Amino acid sequence: MATVLITGTNRGIGLEFVKQYLKRGNKVLATCRDPQQANELSMLASTDSSLQLFSLDISEESSMGELAEQLSDQAIDIFINNAGVYGPRNASFGNVNVEDWEPVMRVNAIAPFLLTQRIIGSLRRGRDKKLVYITSKMGSIDDNQGGGSYIYRSSKTALNSIVRSLSVDLAGDGFSVAVMHPGWVLTDMGGPNALIDTITSVSGLIGVIDGLSLDKSGQFFNYDGNTIAW
């Protein structure tokens, strides 16, 4: 079975990815900032040897470098960049500043690219060669009819553009690359009014990942497999 690297696994969608890939019999490499404080994740690791935990602060390049060294002998088949932040909820016109904007851009757009560069050796040794980046429909320029949310929207739009370029640049190495929208999910980020739970979201996303291939690379997918306009 595949070896799957997942970031941002201490809760929500990331944790559900871990659970579902483990149930399918895969080897899972899970990262979060402090695995010792991620109680449910730690409990899973204590009972399932197919799960390995790694510390990763996606906002720190040194932390990315340490992870890349730890994974240097691994062959990673599927990489799921799930880690992300929303930033200030009141990022409407007149309320946006550089101090709030920069860390969100770093975590949501810059870090996924830098981490991919760091671990590309392990990814090239993988069999499936699938790179998946969790984005949001809020990053779609075409879909933006509501305005506002400048910080989060722009960070996900930037991520989408970066991943589209990755799909072009890595095609020659056999990589299938995509951004995926998980839906409006009942998580800390999604809030209590969200429409679907993590189980529904992640099971759908895994189905899309299963079907991801070179001819579908570079696309923007919804969790149900439909494509989303850029």
Image (cartoon, rainbow, N blue to C red):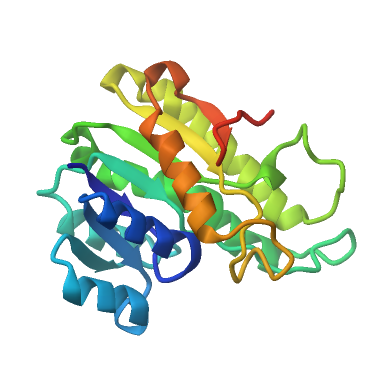
Q: Residue furthest left?
A: 73
Quadrant of image for the C terminus:
top right
Closest to the observer, 192 or 81 = 192
Quadrant of image for the N terminus:
top left
Quarter where residue 223 is shown: top right
Q: Can residue 8 be seen in this view?
A: no
Q: In this figure, what is the number of numbered marks?
A: 0
Quarter where residue 212 is shown: top left
Closest to the observer, 65 or 229 = 229
Which residue is rendered at x = 20% and y = 51% of the image?
25
Residue 181 left/right relative to 123 = right
Which residue is rendered at x = 81% and y = 41% of the image?
144
Which residue is rendered at x = 13% and y = 65% of the image?
49
From the top left corner, tell me how far across and down residue 12 is, in percent: 49, 66
Is residue 111 shown above or below 96?
above
From the top left corner, tell me how far across and down residue 84 is, in percent: 53, 59
